[in-house]
Image (cartoon, grey):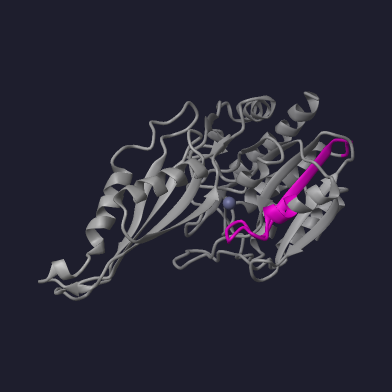
Amino acid sequence: MTTVLTDPVGLAAGLIHCPSVTPDDAGAIGLLAGWLERLGFTCHRIESATGGPPIQNLYARRGTAGPNFCFAGHTDVVPPGAGWTVDPFAGQVMNGRLYGRGAVDMKGAIAAFVAAIARRGDNADSVSLLITGDEEGPAVDGTVKVLDWLTARGETLDACVVGEPTNPARLGDMLKIGRRGSMNTRITVHGTQGHAAYPHLADNPIPRLLDMLRRLTAEPLDHGSPLFQPSTLALTTIDVGNAATNVIPAQARAGFNIRFNDLHSSASLEEWIRRTLAEIGGDYDCAIEVSGESFLTQPGPLSAAVSDAVQRITGLRPEFSTSGGTSDARFIKNHCPVLEFGLINQTMHKVDEHVALSDLEQLTEIYQAVLDRFFEAE
Ligand SMILES: [Zn+2]
């Protein structure tokens, strides 16, 4: 039976049938490419394996004129975990809902976008899809590699919507116009081991580590900026691992994660961290890993097109937000204005992940209206 390309429920169920737990593709990218080829897209499969097993990615485009509107997303999913009441890869419909791993994050949104293109029919508008199989994993062989490939070909994107699930409670609640940055720091303070009864013969690293952490957490990093929540510093671990009661340990370790807004950069925060630690002094190591800088797509034509479309279909005016974790939008923002709008995120990564069939239908109508508005405005 041929898949009906205008039906987001059938398309989403088809993708859910592929158990594409990162890094496995399980046929998901090929299935999607087959649908897009039927809709007149030229599909490029981009495989990358620098970070481990080979990852399947897809760039598909229809139309040659500018501007090029891109939909970005991922076909990979997190492992189902235990405790499901249905088969996580069966794509079962029950009580007006489609169940399965990836239903909202984010095979449902990919299905809605494909159905939106199918419903718009043939036209000369340039639409592309940038789909990766490595978003839930290390994200080194995914979107970044496709963007490099596009740059090498001289191919440009003019606007991008990422289909991550952005809505807290109702479809139309929220679109994301940026994200906070994220960085992780690990501190190891070195001392000299000794007898707890003779501390003058030892050098206890724990008080110095505590002084460092106290100083780093003494003041809030900021109080937020117009479109961002306050930055946060969360201690994630303090490790000494000393089982003895009469021994001063030789080392003490701690780790923390910073989520930062547009008042900082990872460089300015690293400078502050290293300066603060140096004020305490002594022998220590500090390793800092940056996951991504904060970014913001200023409210403009793209956010207007999306929020107008959302309001027309749902009656809700979506809040512009920069809350939540990181997504691949952090890479795309270097290429074109990008924002995120998808399904309701209540069941993402949980057991019995599901999407209301009515939400899949409405998201399809929203994506169709976004494309209509975007190309009308040109
Ligand atoms: Zn996702």
- Taking 50 as reference, is 258 left or right? left
Identity of the residue drawn at 65% across and 30% down: 306
Please provide percent x and percent y for residue 89: 60, 65
- Residue at image position (61%, 51%) is 106
**In this view of the protein, can residue 31 be seen by the observer?**
yes
- Residue at 61% across / 39% down in the picture? 340
Which image quadrant: the C terminus?
top right
Q: Nearer the viewer, residue 23 or 165?
A: 23
Lateral position of residue 278 relative to residue 84, left or right? left
Instruction: Reply above or below: 245 against 346.
Output: below
Q: Position of residue 248 (x, y in %)?
A: 20, 70
Up-down relation of residue 130 to residue 78 (above or below): above
Part of the protein shown in magenta = 122-147
Q: Position of residue 243 (x, y in %)?
A: 21, 75
Residue furthest left as drawn: 197
Q: Position of residue 288 (x, y in %)?
A: 47, 55
Of residues 80 and 319, which is closer to you in this image? 319
Q: Is residue 141 magenta?
A: yes
